[in-house]
Amino acid sequence: MKATAPPMQRIEPNTAAIQCLQQIVHTFFEHQIKRYIMGQILSSESAATGLGSGVADLHQDTFYQIVNSDAVNLEETITTELLAPLTHFNFPVTSAGVRLYFKIDTKAAESQKRLAAFKTAWDIGAKIRSQDILDTIGATLPQPGDDVLFNLNLAPKPNPAGASNTQPQPREEQPTRYQAGESGPWTEEEEAKHPRAAKGSRHGGEFVRKDEARGSVDPLDERYQQGLRGEVPPHNSLTPEERAAFDAGSKEAFRLGEEIRRRQRKIESARKSRKQNDLSAGQKDRLQKETDGWAAEIDALNAQRQRKDKYVNKTPYKYHTTTEKFGIVAKRIWDDKEKFIDAIVDAIKDKVEGITDPEQLREIAKGIAKKMLTKLAPGVGAAEAAAQAGAAVIELGGELYSFKLNLDAAQTEGDLDEAADKLRQGMAKVLVDKAWDTLVGKIKARAKAAGGKIARGKDGQPDAGAAKQGGGKGGPPPAGGGNPPGGKPDDIQVGVGKGGGANGKKPPGNAGPKAPQAAGVPPVKPPIVVPVGKQKKKGDEENHSNNPKDCANANLANNTNADFAGTLRGGKVTLPGVKTKPITYTKVDPSVAHALRGKFNTTDRPAFLKKIAAKHEAELRKAGLSKKDIADMKNGLAPEDYQVHHKLPLDAGGTNDPSNLILIKNEPYHKTITNYQNDSIRGMAPGEVRKFDFPVPEGFVYPP
Amino acid sequence: MISNQLFNELTVKIKHYGRSLQPPSSDNKLNALRVRSRQELGCDISNDYCDLLATVNGLDWNGLVIYANERVPIPGYSDRFIEGFVEGNLDFRDFEPWKDYLIYADDGVVLFTYHISQQRYEVVLRVGMSLLESFDTFNDLLTNALSGHM
């Protein structure tokens, strides 16, 4: 038997399995590898993205993060392994301290996205830094001299002045005047450079702080523009907060200025005095440093104030508040001091015809003007000046309050000028009246010191009948007295004139004052005052009258010790503790009293009652007011059968200041006083000035 | 009469502070007042004023005094009074120029008057007699007086 080899069968390999394996390795594991290594697959495969699900974006973002990470690693590798050795090899000396970096731009796609975001933000009006955009696209700001390309359609229009700007130029990055904190009229060059800003922000030829480069506009100017469009009165568009802030700034600047001046005076005084070593060098240095600090603070505050003043000054006067108009007028008076002094000289002439030396008159006027001008100092600032001047005017007399009413109505430059003139004249007149009293008071004091005697009537009042004129026959007070030549304002001496001197002759020197004869004011007899330390002889006495209708010497009269007695219902009523006082009665225009009455009713009376109830409860209880009365007063309510009385009536220029008010029982006190006052002032016309002895209860409640 | 609103407001305030309104004046007293005014002051009083007194006989509120038909005590006090119309006017007439006025009320600063020769109601400064405001009717005058003291 023949052995046979087992049959061989060729079996063709089946590629299906291979393909299957290959598919498993390639497709499945590659997919998995990509997912685990690359974090996503959509960058290398196609797959369902789930329309609208954001899957594709997620994959893309992941892919870029990986690429970014790889790029950073590569940057580091090339920078440290290649770039550094190359730099060191090629520039062994000059590369010291220099480190070069290899950068790979991996933000291309992100840049598109950010630019789109910038565009969206731009469209909704957001402010974007140009540098951020340039950084996004990897560009830099052009420097002067660079050749630049840009969209002509969006470029500023060519120079209207005709400059040959055919080739658009990049904007030079020089600080604008706004940035430099400057102001002033625009130059032609600036107008040419910033045509849009020039068109939109030039008011009255003044440079307004508008920075076209930044597109920023001073908010005050914006609101001023609103005013010009009639949307709101320009001036009123200042918010109360702004107004308060500006005013507070002005006041603070003034306060600091005062403090600085005080310190400077202290330093100067110490320097001049014998005790100049009182202040050590260290102390002086400390004071000086403090002063310098304040000065810097003042500068800042003044800049703030000037900003507001500038805004206010651009606004038509009719929109100004009365206070601001007051400030403007006060500044005009300050700026033109000579005019004010002229007005005072005129007012003095009415009083002292005898002084003919113009220089002497001006010296006196300057002395009188000094106090008021200090109040009007421009450094105070408009608002503060207004407040100061207002207070001064109120202090001087309600006659000038009518000035405020003029200001209320003032709408034009001419109105303000007119108001300034009136205020100037009014202040001069009242100041002279006041100053004159002071001067006469000084002279009287000197006369007393020199041993002069004053004749008194039975009730202690200076008695006209008892007056004796030394030497000559006692006639009426003279119209002119002696005044030593060359005397200073404070040294003015009023001598007795005809019939008043020791020998009955007019003393040498310039004539003294005569009776005040302001325009429209009836002449008032001048005081008789003995020349200082000279002609005083036994029998020289003052001529005083106790008749309220004939109060020639009212302001010289000492307060009588006797209690005031008036009449009521035909009988005599004595008011214990109430004395008469000499007062200058300046009858005001009714509109002044009307305005003050309104304020009295609404604010000043309740405020006064609250104040005294809070501070003087014990005294009020002692005066007979009940606890309930006082509780009501604390609510601003007057007790029954009591009224609040003006010591100096509103009609006489009195104010609602608490010092001029008193709580008084109606019957019989209030009526007795006011009846007497009415009787005294009978026949006076508005503007007229007289002097009286008026019953003035002291304190805050009567009877106490 | 003055507006109900103003009067109601006043009444509420007076009560709020624990005070009382004066009781109304009787007709007899009002008639007597008319006669006295004519005889002693030489002028008739306003009917509106009489109507007011028929509601509340005088007022002393926050410094404002509206005269009563005669001097009457203020409720709650034995030593405080509201002045009578005729007496009050006679007191002022110690100063002769007031004879041309009928004074209905005063508040310390001004008098609320009827100016006889001018035939109008006037608010006049108590000292100085300057005219501040004028009205055609008593009620307008009264409204002005009260509104300054509310």
Image (tube, grey):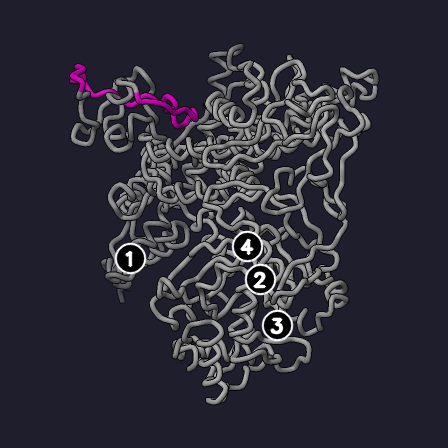
Label 2 or label 3, whichever lies nearer to me, is 3
Q: Tell me the subunit letter for badge 1.
A: A
Kind of residue indicated by mark 2:
Pro
- A274 part of magenta stretch: no
Residue picked out by circle 2: A606
> Where residue A346 sits: x, y (%)?
49, 24
* Label 3 sits on residue: A640
Determine the CA span between mark 3 and mark 1: 112 Å
Quarter of the image where one finds residue A200 = top left
Badge number at residue A643:
none
Q: CA distance from mark 2 to mark 3?
A: 14 Å
Helix, strand or loop for disc 3 = loop
Q: Nearer the viewer, mark 4 or mark 3?
A: 4
Name which quarter of the figure residue A309 lies in. top left
Which subunit holds the residue at mark 2? A
Residue A237 in the image, given as x and y percentages of width and height: 36, 46
Residue A147 in sight here: yes
Image quarter of residue A52: bottom left
Give the residue type at disc 4.
Answer: Asn
Q: Of helix, strand and loop, which one carries label 4?
A: helix
Point out which mark residue A678 bears. 4
Q: Do marks 2 and 3 share a subunit?
A: yes
